[in-house]
Image: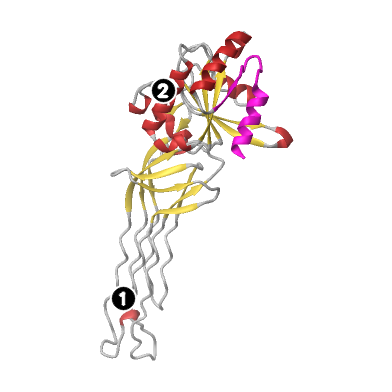
Amino acid sequence: MTEGNFVDYVKINVASGKGGKGSTHLRREKYVAKGGPDGGDGGRGGHIILKGNSQYWTLYHLKFKRHFKAENGYDGGKNRITGSDGKDVYIDVPLGTVVKDTKDQKTIFEITDEGEEKIICEGGKGGRGNWHFKSSTNQTPRYSQPGIPNQEKQITLELKVLADVGLVGFPNAGKSTLLSVVTDAKPKIADYEFTTLKPNLGIVKYRDFRTFVMADIPGIIEGASEGKGLGHYFLRHIERNSTLLFMIPSDSDDIIESYNILLKELKKYNSEMLDKSRLVAITKCDLLDDELIAEIELEIKSKIKEDYIFISSISNIGLVELKDKVWEMLN
């Protein structure tokens, strides 16, 4: 799914370099009647290496360059000179990138740490020169090994955003508004559904210079796990979050039913997501009076096991308590 310069899914072709062939050179030198074989080994072909880079937050830089080819190894030379290795090709990817084989969609590996390097295509090994094959019965071998062929793959890169807290809710639940108030992020905010079309990250400043990262994804609707709406494109971005903050507007027709629908969609997408710690935030509580809050609180207590809190991003109600609860859950 791409929106603006945010790209979290891309297919690329990668090919390593083939190994250089060994030399079949025979030593020819003045006053040396029988020099024998002195052919050197071929060089290794270049690898294709994926490297984690925290300066990237999207796969946009790979959107227009889809083919990567490493250099071939150089052939061996006389005097047992080994051929040079082919140059490796490094592909920088953001942290949280999942690498899959495009053919069968099996996960090959993930890049999650800064500077982490993993080889996706190994370069071919260089062939051995003819001096390796001399023996008492074959003192002048006129053959050598060719280099090992290169590897070629088509891979899919998927980005799963790394954040501590993921905001989960229906469209227009106030997720982007909360992110804009508690962080310095500037997500698009408007009074219509699916205003958010890409994940947004923000750093929440907590007491004593401590921080945690919050992720806002497009709203989930009923049937999102089956492909409805936009939410299913981005559900993978909250797979890595340790805490999920469910945001349900106080003016919803049925708060409990809304919460159950969100839980059901997450379970259908990946049942392991229900193992994460959860907090329910009833948003837009500035629209409620004390009686309504007490009534909703009574209903929530009887039907929801998770901890809950009433907040209003516009009026700054309950935001300090929200940060306290989230920090407590993260630590």
| Closer to us: 115 or 207 | 207
Q: Can you say which quadrant of the picture contains the N terminus?
A: top left
Mark 2 surroundings: few (<14), some (14-19) or many (≥20) residues within 10 A: some
- What label sits on residue 189 in the rendered view? none
Choose between 209 and 197: the one closer to the eye: 209
Residue underneath mark 2:
261
Q: Residue at x 33, y 85 (%)?
A: 36
- Element class at badge 1: loop
Residue 321 among magenta residues: yes
Residue 91 in the image: x percent, y percent?
A: 46, 47
* Residue 76: x %, y % from top left: 37, 70
Q: Which residue is outermost to the right?
A: 208
At 63% from the left and 15% from the top, the residue drawn is 314
Asked which quadrant contains residue 214, the reply is top right
Residue 117 in view (yes/no) = yes
Q: Residue at x 48, y 13 (%)?
A: 252
Relative placement, left or right, of 139 versus 121 is: left
146 lies above or below 209: below
Whether residue 64 appears in this view of the structure is no
The mark that comes first in sequence, 2 or 1, is 1
Residue at (59% x, 13% y) in the render: 293
Amino acid type indicated by mark 1 = Thr
* Quadrant of res 46: bottom left
Q: Nearer the viewer, residue 148 or 186?
A: 186
Q: Up-down: is 115 above or below 61?
A: below
Task: Give the position of the C terminus as an image quadrant.
Answer: top right
**Residue sitting nearer the eye, 248 or 98:** 248
Numbered range of the magenta stretch = 307-331
Q: How is the image coloured?
A: secondary structure
Q: Residue furthest front?
A: 302
Q: Amino acid at mark 2?
A: Ile
Q: Which residue has dot 1 on it? A: 24
